[in-house]
Amino acid sequence: MTDSYFEEGSLVGVLTAEPLDRVLDYRAPEGGCWLGSFVEVPLGPRKVLGVIWGPGKGDWDIAKVRHVIRVLDAAPMREELRIFLEKAGAYTLTPMSAMLRLATRVPGLSDPPSMRKIYRLGRGEPDRVTDARRRVIETLTEYGGLGFTLKELSDLAGVTSSVVKGLAQMGVVEEADTPRDAPYLPLDPDLPAKTLTEDQAAAADALRDGLRQRRYGTTLLKGVTGSGKTEVYLEAVAECLRAGRQALVLLPEIALTSEFLSRVRARFGAEPAEWHSGVTMTERRRAWKMVGQGAAQLVVGARSSLFLPFQDLGLIVVDEEHDSSYKQEEGALYNARDMAVLRASLNDAQVVLASATPSLESWANAAAGKYTRLDLSSRFGDAVLPQMRAIDMRAEDLPGQAWISPTLQSEVAHRLQQGEQSLLFLNRRGYAPVTLCRACGEQVGCDNCDARMVEHRFQKRLVCHQCGETKPIPDACPHCKVEGKMAAVGPGVERIAEEAARVFPDAKLAVLSSDLFGSARALKSQIAAIAEGDTDIIIGTQLVAKGHNFPRLTLVGVIDSDLGLQGSDLRAAERTFQLMRQVSGRAGRVEKPGLALMQTFQPEHPVIRAILSGDEEGFWRAEAAEREAAAMPPYGRLAGIIISANEAAAAFDLGTHLARTDGPLQQIGAVVYGPAPAPIARVRGRHRVRLLVKAPKGAPIQSAIARWIAPLKLNANLRLSVDIDPQSFY
């Protein structure tokens, strides 16, 4: 055996994704294996996936040690990825088995290399066009030149396999044999790029210089909405590709990928690899394999693409780095923004954090000199930043059950006359957040959660936004059985759409909300139609705030600017500020000036004043001063402890026990708050209790919490999870 090669029969340690939380001893297979090799091993009566993690310990009866079954056809896991998984697991207090699952979420990894039949759009014409045939053709057209297996294409188009085979016989669909996992087309970094403005060119040069040094560094790329941040960091991607290294671009929302992929194709002449829930299983396997072989130069993906087996990762871009969707809230609780910085530091890679409204953590790191900061202060081309004004709702004459003020109505009507688009924004899905019985006062709640059910009138259902449970909208009250007294209380985007249709009967409306689209393809199609001017009034949730470019949009009306200011969330002010600035930035992105109007009952609120004044640095300084005075993140440490059980008493008993035995936390100067019921105290039938640990900034909070919870012996009813650096407190 050398340092990294294990000869046949020698003892090897194998980490599996099974919840055992220890490395198991096996004997190396015939032909031996390498450190990091992906292998199949016997575990009881089953065969499971594992990775050679090092030499075996020999602390097991040698006679009973079994052999590795086989080495899989995949590039061995590199040392930097193994270290990344260990460090990320230690930081988030996640077991190594769960970390390995993040790095091996790929279908068919253990399948042997083979050929497969795929189906693409051919050149023939159908003898007649049926609805089913049209759906197949539209699906293939929508996905460009991608090939699909018969099942994938049938499922995507919603047809039987015989429809696809019939089209193949006519030549409308092309059937071909191809290797299961093929390299991606090469990207050309030297194709002509867009002409950059002076400050864009300066920022691109700075990023290129960082990449040429081939060492770790993080840059906060802060630019006003529409300033061309994407073009700047694509030049960094080009420099990374010239150096023969791989690049990763993280996007917060799958709906953004379509427009971004078009820009990548225009800049580099070919498609990148994609890694998110919207790609087929076949493409996920191909992307994983080709990334490991270095045959995918650029990956565009969701937060989980951080765990792909890159051969030589030179650049990670986190676009809209402030976005809360980068925090994984189930299973392994990690923040992709922070993990991107960790992974880059182990790869001698550069990180670009891009945002018009950065997170306070990134702002503070740049202010402290930990990150380089580059600013783009003006919009690209002729576009100018929108004018921003408040509508004081206390002075508006608005009838009950109406939410679009007369002032906002007048501005929308003016845009309609000019042939321009308006956006009405409300960050609340559905028709109404509460359904109330006017006879007995009962609010319809979820049977499995302590949450009110939200009416989705377009779907004719009540939906729990915690667990996804749905039920029909009732005619009679489920509590008192009185009929005809059920009332929707408060507005969601569907209700605003209903009001807009009544006020503007001749306008063409479109509602953009994630729950209204069955697929990413349908959402992408709607966004493209809006961008082409097919809509007069857009009604949307925060989905519209994320990077879309609507050239005809000149008015943004925020229906409830006060919504995010309610409650005791640590980041309420920050999130409201970010969301309002992002939404207002949708207006006036081409040659026509834009206007953003914010309906508010609190125009004197510091956050509203900061948004209207445009004094972003003043807002961040004030917010930072408040957090620092309270020793809250990023000037202190927080960790959430979430306990759940079938019975509330069991969860509280464990929480109380923990609060009374906080010796390891006291040793580092930490304080424990709670236990207290979680704001939503029951989810999916389980009762939830929270504790909050607050510690000084430099305190070793992870090791202290590990010592604190180590003695616990949890029965099958109890679950405990630790959330380091929590982003939400529900």
Image: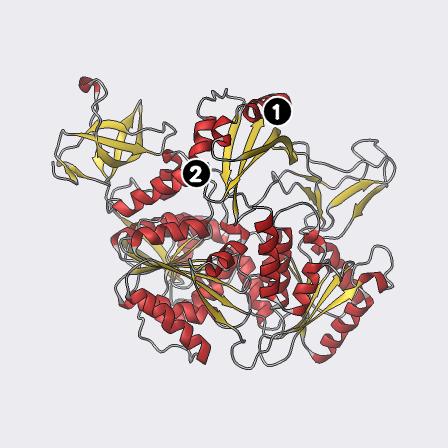
| Identity of the residue drawn at 29% across and 39% down | 110
Q: Position of residue 360 (x, y in %)?
A: 54, 56
Left or right of residue 5: residue 704: right
Quadrant location, the C terminus: top right
Which amino acid type corresponds to the residue marked 1 in the rendered image? Phe
Tag 1 residue: 652
Q: Could you give the CA–CA distance between mark 2 and mark 1, rounded to whole angstroms? A: 26 Å
Q: Which residue is nearer to you in this view: 477 or 618?
A: 618
Seen from the viewer's position, the closer of residues 495 and 343 is 343
The crowd level at tag 2 (other Cα within 10 Å; few <14, some 14-19, many 20+) is some
Residue that carries the numbered disc 2 in the rendered image? 700
Report how many numbered discs are placed on residues in the image: 2
Asked if residue 559 is positioned above or below residue 336 in the image, the reply reads below
Q: Nearer the viewer, residue 123 or 235?
A: 235
| Res 274 visible | yes
Callout 1: helix, strand or loop? helix
Q: Quick check: can you spot residue 180? A: no
Amino acid type at image mark 2? Pro
427 vs 434: above or below: below
Q: Which of marks 2 and 1 is nearer the N terminus?
A: 1
Q: Quadrant of the N terminus?
A: top left
Q: Which one is closest to the eye, mark 2 or mark 1?
A: 2
